[in-house]
Image (tube, rainbow, N blue to C red):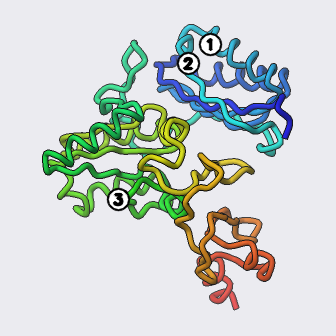
């Protein structure tokens, strides 16, 4: 891979009066610079991942920070290029993260989500875990991602809600399954941190009393501790790379859905209209070239 290419990952909460106009500007900016990726805008701010030649990506960041609302935009840099994204997508949505509860999210003029949980640095995460353990109140890690992502990587002993999409979190939180955690210390985590900015508000609104989130998400924690911390396995990412590792020898926690061989490989369902991912090892992937997910298989059976 060329060292002259990079991927920039970022999100920034800021009250936006005209997200549609900003979306047009962002789209033209990316096209002019030859970048691809995914950018979402809402009245709450911006969330994006863009890739391409490093000079072009840096120019993009500089221009984006030139907008008053985004002047404090923080960017996480990752190896990769525009080739990791098939196209450019810039969309305006009601929420930056689709929990279907936009009415519960308010962004202050200081560009902070009102009521979000305190941010912990990676070092503070480990310190809190050790402190609460000594107090006899162990910390629970709460996965803020879609459940399939935890199959290849998660924090040690984390609670993984039964979620297929982000919209499932509200049902999960209101189901009573996690009521025993409402008076316990809970650290939420997600890939880069944006989901937890919102998720912790939604959890607090539903009675969770001691909530924290990881500043910079799994990405920053993994960059800090590699595989020597509390994170185990590989990190799923939403582009053609599919997964990131934080060392040359990550712990493999996933197992092939077909043969139970340890693996961190996620594969798409081969049905062109389906985006379901499953943990499938290399050998089974080669041996079952027309494999479809369980849902597509059941649908095909009904159709017959």
Q: CA distance from mark 2 to mark 1?
A: 6 Å
Q: What residue is drawn where x is 52% and y is 38%?
A: 192
| Image quarter hosting the N terminus | top right
Q: Nearer the viewer, mark 3 or mark 2?
A: 3
Residue placed under numbered mark 3 in the picture:
159
User: Where residue 89 sits: x, y (%)?
Assistant: 72, 38
Q: What residue is drawn where x is 32% and y is 31%?
A: 116
Looking at the picture, does residue 24 appear above or below residue 169? above
Q: CA distance from mark 1 to mark 3?
A: 36 Å
User: Where residue 39 sits: x, y (%)?
Assistant: 65, 33
| Image quarter hosting the C terminus | bottom right
Q: Which mark is residue 73?
A: 2
Q: Earlier in the sequence, mark 2 or mark 1?
A: 1
User: Where residue 101 sits: x, y (%)?
Assistant: 38, 42
Please rate how many residues cluster around mark 1, counting C-alpha atoms within 10 Å: few if below 14, some from 14 to 19, many from 20.
some
Q: Which mark is residue 192?
A: none
Q: Nearer the viewer, residue 104 or 77?
A: 77
Looking at the picture, does residue 208 appear above or below residue 73? below
- For the residue labelled by badge 1, is the local secondary structure a helix, a strand or a loop? helix
Left or right: residue 64 versus residue 148 is: right
Q: Nearer the viewer, mark 1 or mark 3?
A: 3
Residue placed under numbered mark 1 in the picture:
65
Left or right: residue 135 versus residue 278 is: left
The residue lying furthest to the bottom in this view is 304
């Amino acid at each position: 891979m060329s060292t002259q290419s990079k991927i920039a990952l970022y999100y920034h909460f800021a009250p936006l009066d005209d997200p549609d106009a900003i979306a047009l500007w962002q789209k033209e900016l990316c096209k002019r610079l030859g970048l691809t990726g995914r950018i979402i805008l809402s009245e709450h701010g911006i969330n994006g991942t863009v890739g391409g030649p490093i000079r072009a990506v840096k120019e993009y960041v500089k221009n984006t920070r030139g907008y008053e609302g985004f002047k404090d935009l923080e960017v996480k840099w990752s190896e990769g290029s525009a080739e990791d994204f098939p196209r450019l997508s810039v969309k305006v949505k009601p929420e930056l993260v689709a929990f279907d509860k936009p009415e519960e999210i308010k962004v202050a003029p200081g560009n902070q989500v009102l009521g979000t949980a305190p941010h912990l640095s990676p070092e503070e995460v480990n310190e809190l875990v050790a402190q609460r353990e000594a107090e006899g109140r162990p910390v629970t890690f709460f996965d803020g991602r879609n459940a399939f992502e935890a199959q290849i990587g998660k924090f040690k002993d984390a609670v993984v809600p039964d979620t297929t999409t982000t919209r499932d979190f509200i049902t999960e939180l209101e189901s009573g399954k996690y009521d025993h955690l409402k008076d316990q210390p809970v650290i939420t985590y997600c890939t880069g941190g944006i989901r937890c900015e919102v998720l912790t508000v939604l959890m607090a609104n539903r009675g969770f009393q001691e909530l924290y989130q990881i500043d910079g998400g799994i990405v920053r924690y993994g960059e800090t501790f590699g595989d020597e911390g509390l994170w185990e396995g590989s990190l799923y990412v939403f582009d053609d790379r599919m997964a990131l590792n934080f060392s040359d020898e990550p712990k493999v926690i996933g197992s092939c859905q077909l043969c139970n061989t340890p693996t961190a490989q996620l594969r798409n369902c081969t049905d062109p209209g389906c985006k379901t991912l499953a943990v499938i090892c290399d050998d089974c992937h080669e041996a079952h070239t027309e494999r479809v997910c369980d849902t597509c298989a059941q649908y095909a059976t009904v159709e017959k």
